[in-house]
Amino acid sequence: MAENQNMEAQSEKLLEVKDLHVSFFTPAGEVKAVGGISYELNYGEVMGIVGESGSGKSQEAYAIMGLLQSPGKVIGGSITFEGEDVLAKSREEMTEFRGTRAAMIFQNPMTSLNPVYTVGNQLIEALRTHDKKITKKEAAKRAMEMLELVGINNVAKRMKQYPHEFSGGMRQRVMIAMGLICHPKLLIADEPTTALDVTIQAQILELMKDLQKKTQMGIIFITHNLGVVAEICDKVSVMYAGKIVEQGAVNDIFYHPSHPYTLGLLRSMPRVDADEHERLIPIEGTPVDMLNPPDGCPFAPRCEHCMKICLQKMPPHVEIGEGHKSACWLRVLEKKKDESVGAEGGAEVRESKQKED
């Protein structure tokens, strides 16, 4: 029975990242971009990774896709995709892996699309690179179907146009079509709505939700926009200075934030339901120097609840609720206090029972 449950849990798991470390070896020294993060993603699940610029969100995604640029290297940990070790794959195997099994949408479509090739040629090339058996005619047909799927009209004409002839929202739709053309099981979207206005952003999010429901693919959505996370994600990982400081279901993160950094992000975000005169509270201080990361909690110098131990030692992840974890010494102390109160209460109950006997 237990073996069957383990097999079921394993079969639901699409991606597992364990204790991942990514460093950049520069002339100035080692920049520890990602410092030991772990998470799981199931089939059909959407996970948001949030945090300010420089927190390591994009670098961990590049590590999954095998796209880390020199001098960046994965120096520790493991990445398992459908039970296979991604880090052990050869360059040829990674080329096959990208596109057919995992795809990525990049932040700026104008720099991701080739300006001297038509959109149609780029979509056909993406498909034929990963599917050698498909003919050019079949590839063109599939490319037009994908453009229609992402909401682009008059596809026969659009296939012959160049990227500069498309608006920002249309280019982002082309990038989504390119990412999905080989039907991947995992889609990593790196801030895909950053350069778009609010109306187009809403359309892109709606499109991604629809496609995710139709295909049951897993999505990792990287962003610093918490409004986008609330709209599309099932669960959230909050990153700061290369570490995941809090993880949980989207409702837990928004309504029961446990880490001071998560709370700071939420307080600095405009709210529709807030009082008219309520001021936004910025997070004071400056980000961590990743060349010389601190021994303790990286957020400690900016935290209003900072204690001596916060500066000396990195806190462990504490279980706040089901699937909700936080790396904060405040939560560690609260848990110890609850356990001691529980132990005292248990001792009192045992004493009273002994007296009754």
Image: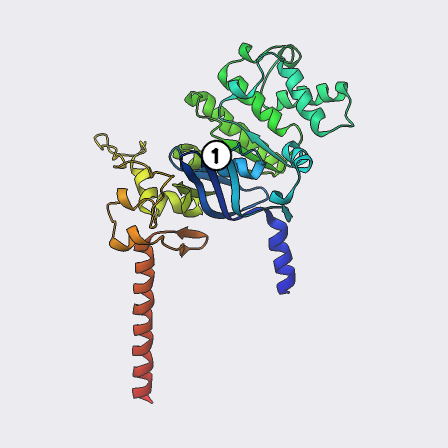
Tell me residue 162's x, y (percent).
59, 11
Tell me residue 243's x, y (percent).
41, 45
Residue 242 drawn above or below residue 352: above
Quadrant housing the N terminus: bottom right
Asked whether 311 or 82 is in front, the reply is 311
Residue pictured at 61% horizontal, 43% vertical: 86
Horizontally, is 165 left or right of 315 in the view?
A: right
Residue pictured at 44% horizontal, 22% vertical: 195
Asked whether 34 or 221 is in front, the reply is 34
Residue 77 drawn above or below residue 199: below
Q: Which residue is most to the left?
A: 277
Q: Please, what is the three-letter code of the amino acid marked with disc 1?
A: Ser
Q: Which residue is most to the bottom?
A: 357
Which residue, given by chain and number where applicable, does mark 1 sit on?
Answer: 58
Mark 1, Cα crowd under 10 Å, few <14 / some 14-19 / many 20+, is many
Q: Decide if residue 255 is in sight here.
A: yes
Residue 286 quadrant: top left
Horizontally, is 353 left or right of 127 in the view?
A: left
